[in-house]
Image (cartoon, rainbow, N blue to C red):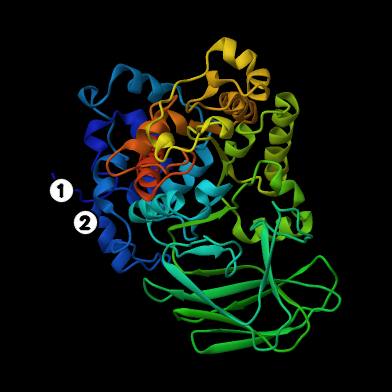
Amino acid sequence: MKCQSGLSCVETRLSRPMRLALIVLTPMLLAGCFEEENNKREAGNTARDIPDLSKKVDRSFKGDRLQATSRPSEQSLTPNREAALRSVPESAPLSGFYRALIGLQLGVRSKPVTVLHIGDSHIAADRFTGTLRELFQTRFGDAGRGMMMPGFPFPYYQAKGVEFTRSGRWIAANSFKMDAGPYGVSGVRVTTREKGARLTLTSKEGAFEWAEVVFSTAPRGGQASVSFGGSEKSISTQGESPGVERVHIASKGRELAVAAKGNAPVSILSWSVGQNRPGIRYVNFGIPGATADTPRRWDEALVDSDLSKLSPDLIVLGYGTNEGFDDDLDMAAYEARVADLISRFKLRAPQASFLVLGPPDGLRFPRYARGKRRGALASATCRALSDAERGRYAELRKAKSPQLARWHAPPKLAAVRKSLHRVADREGARFWDWSQVMGGPCGIHSWANAKPPLAASDRVHLRTAGAKRSAHALFDELMKDYEIHVRLASR
């Protein structure tokens, strides 16, 4: 039966009291009816200007997930899933983020949904986060690349979809390495004192519709120019420190360039490119070696400014690996610091939902036991620590015991996961255990030995294939939860 209007699609199925209640939901139903009607309204909407996302949004998801007029059949649900549909409250973790996504798919949200993902080296090269960005943007629309680290903050920094070039001398400062600040949420800064020094960002996937550069100000700050899409603006970075100057250019272009105009210092904290349409912006800032303590070195005023600009709907915390390899980590103090970090972000971004990632599996092979035989590490076995070994671990390492001459997870890594899980539960955040995707203890050993390998030979970092597999696993899990919220909203 073809839908003639949002209400007539369902009125034959509903009792008279339910018809009256449906009046309140009519706008939502009208927005979420069949795709044929959506396309007609998007083509000639006179009430409001909603951009056509048909070329950016994968609408194949819409047919069975946004039927606001129907309830899932008994055959399509397992008993546990049906129970979940009845029990998930509006205050459940990520419910705010999911409501924002529903707004995108219904076409009633005009601004992008922004994800801010901060963490360590697992997201620094943008393989894991880059795949998540592609998955989210394919389903919910592409609002552009969003905010990025400037230029070359550390050797293997990458950002999918764009490339960077530089000329002249630029010096990078890093909040993990305890370099002097100030820092915003990118956690890095690049500075030049050379006239004519230049940084460029070039799109590899088409033009953007706006660009923005964030400079940090200083009493002796220098002059710079920003060019994008045929437009150019000059900026002075002289001012009170710490502070920021934002240069925004509303133009269509593929190359963003910043050039120093004198020998006074010019410092860049971040730069952004995007589209003027709804969709997803997935912003990632990962620093090799970073821990959950790293954001505590960021300047509060600059973080406030960045979060106000980003207005994230979801904040993802991706720390834990480096803490797990710290055998002297005080777990109680660490747990308190993570809770404090989330509380600080909640104050600055009250609209945001929170997702806490438990670190992926990681292994250690003591240096004293490695020997000199080539390929010995690759052929070595992996076995989790026993309770006795865990209890005497410091003693065994100090004695250079051959008992530890194998791949094994450091004893604090599992404790860090449990700690992060507890904090997430207390703070109303969603927790995801990355190590379970890999098969649990020694999972990364299997990934490193896979053909082709999914993990690096160090048994800590992932290769591109492993990062993609992980991203798909997380996305699928989030979308299962999202479907529950969609069906609850459709009632």
Q: Is residue 196 above or below residue 97?
A: below
Q: Which residue is mark 2?
A: 36
Q: At 36% across and 29% down in the image, what residue appears?
A: 17
Q: Nearer the viewer, residue 89 or 208?
A: 208
Q: Quadrant of residue 237?
A: bottom right
Asked whether the residues under the numbered discs 1 and 2 touch, taking CB atoms below 8 Å apart as contact, a structural biologist would say yes
What residue is drawn where x is 64% and y is 24%?
397
Viewer-closest of 383 and 62: 383
The image quarter containing residue 29 is top left
Observer-nearest of 244 and 449: 449
Judge left or right: residue 41 versus residue 84.
left
Sequence-wise first label, 1 or 2: 1
Where residue 391 appears, as percent x and y from the top left, is 64, 13
The amino acid type, in three-letter code, at marker 2 is Glu
Mark 1 burial class by Cα count in 10 Å: few <14, some 14-19, many 20+: few
Residue 418's place in the image compared with 169, above or below, is above
- Residue 423 in the image, given as x and y percentages of width and height: 64, 28
Q: Residue at x 39, y 49 (%)?
A: 27
Outermost left residue: 1
Whole-percent x, y for residue 325 in the image: 61, 33
Is label 2 in a helix, a strand or a loop? helix
* Amino acid type for the residue under numbered disc 1: Lys
Q: Nearer the viewer, residue 205 or 14?
A: 205
Q: How many marks?
A: 2
Q: Quadrant of the N terminus?
A: top left
Which residue is identified by label 1?
2
How far is the residue under mark 1 from the one under mark 2?
A: 9 Å
